[in-house]
Structure formats: C-alpha cells, structure tokens
Image (cartoon, grey):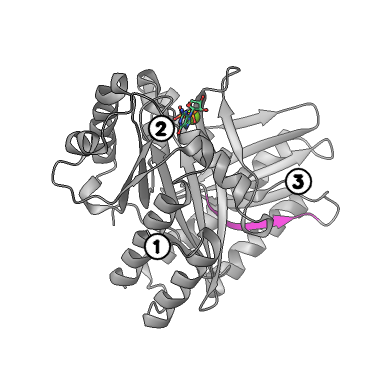
Amino acid sequence: MLEPSVDLYGAAHERVREHLSDLLDRAKARYALVVDRKGFVLLHARAVWAPAPPSLDSLATLVASNHSANAAIAKLFGDDGFREIVQQGADVGTYVEELGPDALLLAVFDGKTTLGKVKVHAARAAVEIRSELAALRESDAPAPTFDASWSESTEKLLDGLFGPRDS
Amino acid sequence: MSTINFAAREINFKIVYYGPGLSGKTTNLKMIYERVPGEAKGEMVSLATEDERTLFFDFLPLDLGTVNGFKTRFHLYTVPGQVFYNSSRKLILRGVDGVVFVADSAPSRLRANAESLRNLRENLLEHDLRLSEIPYVLQINKRDLDDALPVEMIRQVLDPTGTVPAFEAVASRFEGVFEPLKGVSRMVLEKLAQKT
Ligand SMILES: Nc1nc2c(ncn2[C@@H]2O[C@H](COP(=O)(O)OP(=O)(O)O)[C@@H](O)[C@H]2O)c(=O)[nH]1
Ligand SMILES: [Mg+2]
C-alpha cells in the first residue's frame, strides 16, 4: 500500500522505549509519545512524577491532525512544512519532531523544565528514533495470522458490539 | 493501510464518515457514542464551530475486543461537509481503511450528495486511493422526512451499478446507525484477512 504504517516490535521497540525514557529523564518532561501520522499511538512513556495523562487516543489524533494542518498552512506559502511546532500554555507545553515520513515524536512538558531543554533532548532522541524506524522499514515485520478462526472471532465480536441482526 | 502495532499487540483501523454538510455524520458518531457500552469506547473529540458545525473532524475510538492476542480497534472520524472545508477533508482521509458515505434524503440535497461523492473520489486520488478499492458503504439518512426522495432514486445517482451495500437510516432516532458501521467494519476486517 502507498502509505506504509510503522510497525514497532521486538528489540527495536525496546530501544525506542529507552530513547523515550532517556528523553523524559534528561528534559524533565512529563510524557513522550511516538505517534503514527494517521493518529495512532505507537509508543508512550510517562515520567514517574507526572500526573495520569489524558486520553492518549485523543492526544495522538489531535497532534497528528494538527501537524497535517500546520503542514498545509506552510504549503500555502510554498514551504514544505514548519521546522518547529511548539505550543505553550500557562502550565503545559508540547513540542513535536518529525520522525521520517510516517511518525511524529511528541514531548509534553510543564514548568519543571524549559522549552530549550525539551527541544535539545527531543531533537537528540529524534535522531536515534529516526534511524531505528528507517532500519525497521527495511526489515520484515512478523505477520500475524488471519485464518478462519480469526474471521470467526471478529464476526462474533461485531455481533456482540453492534447486535447480531444481519446487515 | 491498517496499522498493526506488534509490541502493543493492536490492530487499528480508520473509518471515515463522509457526505455533504448536515447529512447527519456527526449525529451518527454521537449516537454510536451513546449506544456503545462504556468499556468499548474512548472519549469523543469534536472540533466544531460555536454553532456545532464540524470545523475539522469528530473522532471516536472503539474497541472491538481481542482476537488471537491482538486488540482490534476502530477509529471513527467525520469530515466537515461544507464545500470550503476541503483541506480538512483531505487531511482526514490520510490512511483511511473504510468509508461510510452519509447521504441526505432531502430532494434539495440530491445534488449536494452527488458533489460530495465526487469530491470524495478526488480527495482519495490525492492519497493514491480509489473508492472502488476500499471498503465502502452507503447510509441513506433522514428517511423520516415527509418529502424524502425514493431510495432507488438516490442510489441511482450515487451508485448506478447497485454494487455498494446501502442502509436506510434515521440517524437522529438511532435507526440504521449500527448497521452501516458493522457492514463496513466487516469489510475492512475481511480485506485485512485476504491481504495476508
Ligand atoms: N430529520 C432528520 N434529521 C436528522 C437526521 N439525522 C440528523 N439530523 C439532523 O440534521 C442536522 C445536521 O446533522 P449533523 O449530524 O450535524 O450533520 P453533519 O454536518 O453531517 O455532521 C442536525 O440538526 C440533526 O439533528 C435524520 O435522520 N432525520
Ligand atoms: Mg458534522
């Protein structure tokens, strides 16, 4: 398909997870996420001291959409995209780095740190994660099996969720 | 197109509700949110103007359950229908796995239905996708209107070959809301099974 999705698994997954926790430690940020550009969460990390995060699905969707919208704005001016996407509120701020064509790195921070610090460490983490993702695309992801039993189970789940009345 | 996250053991699908402005797309998502049990749904996000018109999208994540160790999830989106929001519509179609086209039965909206469908085809092409290649169903909404056009007339315009699964609905009364979603979900799941 034209738009490959990012598959993070096995050892690469563990290494990216470590880059995220390093980023949190060094930048003193609250949360760090790797988000698919379609809006799905691929990986997330939370600082031990950080409050429980909001819905990560909502966060990922809004970040990915916002990023696309920003790219569209830049395009209006003939630019490829904005080099930096920062949002800063009274208490929290967000910083986004692109991770190749398919993913984004998001850092969420608060008054415990500074934007400068977050940027430096997010940029460093992004370099590492980008090369992990680039290597991934060349290797083969393990294929889950979608056999008859899988179809049967999904059919049952659909009936359970939406009612058995046939369409 | 589906996103398979092996580490989290999740399979994610993106389903987009498309159609002309005010055909009932947001109403579908609201009804689904109300009727699906708590453990199967996440938060609903609406990016709307003050008068509740969709500005960017509505978003609702649904959990189908776990199959063969993989959590299977559907992310539902609506697009804004008004002609001038086309850039938003284009962005939302990124990575789409399935489409529910919500048509309006009002006689005055027949043309708007046709134009929206043409717009969908054009926007999909920008993502190198063809409507005939992705799971796609029709919901013919607002069947309760006194002057609702005959279903055959609407189908004739939107699906002359009669090959697209179509569902009649009164979304505001929760009639015909789950059926098209179930239909497109099933098609999306089957497509994944065939591909592998
Ligand atoms: N009569 C009637 N009205 C509907 C139906 N479904 C939605 N509506 C109304 O149509 C209007 C537009 O609906 P909305 O979901 O916001 O449309 P959207 O622009 O496609 O998102 C609202 O006032 C709804 O209450 C229906 O089946 N019948
Ligand atoms: Mg709407």
Check the image and report above or below for A57 versus A86: below
| Residue, disc 3 | A29
| Residue, disc 1 | A166
Chain ID of residue with mark 3? A
- Callout 1 and callout 2 share a chain: no
Q: Which range of residues does the magenta coloring cover?
A: A40-47
Chain ID of residue with mark 2? B
| Quarter residue B13 falls in | bottom left
> What amino acid is found at the position of numbered circle 3 in the picture?
Ala
Front disc: 3 or 1: 1
> What amino acid is found at the position of numbered circle 2 in the picture?
Lys
Q: Position of residue A53 (x, y in %)?
A: 75, 48
Is A54 colored magenta in this rendering?
no
Secondary structure under badge 3? loop
Q: Earlier in the sequence, mark 3 or mark 1?
A: 3
Q: Are marks 2 and 3 in contact (CB under 8 Å)?
A: no
Q: Position of residue B176 (x, y in %)?
A: 44, 46
- Residue pictured at 74% horizontal, 46% vertical: A27
Question: Local crowd at mark 1 within 10 Å, few (<14), some, or many (≥20)?
Answer: few
| Residue, disc 2 | B142
